[in-house]
Image: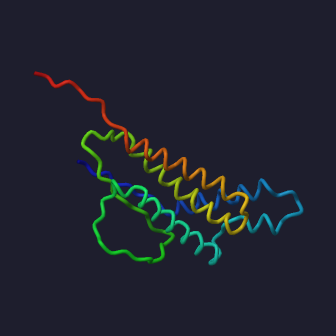
Amino acid sequence: MQNIHITLDLAEIIYDIQNKTYLTGKSRHDGTNHEQVANMQANDDDECANQILRSISTAFNNLKTKLSEYLVTMTLTGDNTPLEADGTLEFTLSMPSNYNNATVDTIASAAHQYIVSSAVAEWFAITCKSDTTQYTALADVCLKIISEAINRRKRPSRRSS
């Protein structure tokens, strides 16, 4: 067995969430719907920032549940301590010895995108329900990518005599 450690930068996740909601709002702007467009966009205002951090926390916990077969846990306790915007999200996966290490970055990237898509889906569930399904589907695609990457194995090699 071997362990792989994944670290995700929370500031980058928040930036991606804000950027996706900004771009969605910008694409819907027709010159007359300023308030509607503004409400679609996540920002650093306290109520928005708190909601984003709660959504990220929920998405991260859901991701860990999905990966629980491989997840290395060091504790038997849990808490709901709020995330800090300048922190990191970390987890370790226990993989078989023939796991293909070339997919570690794929797992990290797809985990990042899963959390972003899940949090954006939750944001749009509040601000623009019609966009929720699209981001939920994107999160599901990320889970498939993670599953494929986790199940990659090294090609066996013939032992020399």
- Please, is residue 43 above or below residue 70 in the view? below
Image coords of residue 42 (percent x, y): 66, 66
When the figure is inspected, residue 10 is found, relative to residue 161, above or below; the finding is below
Say how many tags the image has: 0
Residue at 62 percent across and 60 percent down: it is: 121
Furthest-right residue in view? 32
| In the image, residue 105 above or below residue 66 | above
**Left or right: residue 33 compared with residue 127:** right
Q: Nearer the viewer, residue 106 or 133?
A: 133
Left or right position of 69 against 15: left
Q: Quadrant of the C terminus?
A: top left
Q: Position of residue 64 (x, y in %)?
A: 41, 60
Residue 43 occupies quadrant? bottom right
Residue shown at the point (34%, 57%) measured from the top left:
71
Q: Where does residue 1 sit, x and y in percent of width and height?
A: 23, 48
In the image, is residue 103 above or below residue 113?
Answer: above
Q: Residue at x 30, y 34 (%)?
A: 154
Relative to 125, 57 lies left or right: left
Q: Which x, y percent locates residue 17? A: 61, 60
Q: Which residue is situated farthest in the left direction here?
A: 161
Q: From the viewer's perspective, is 147 left or right of 52?
A: left
Place residue 19 in its image quadrant: bottom right
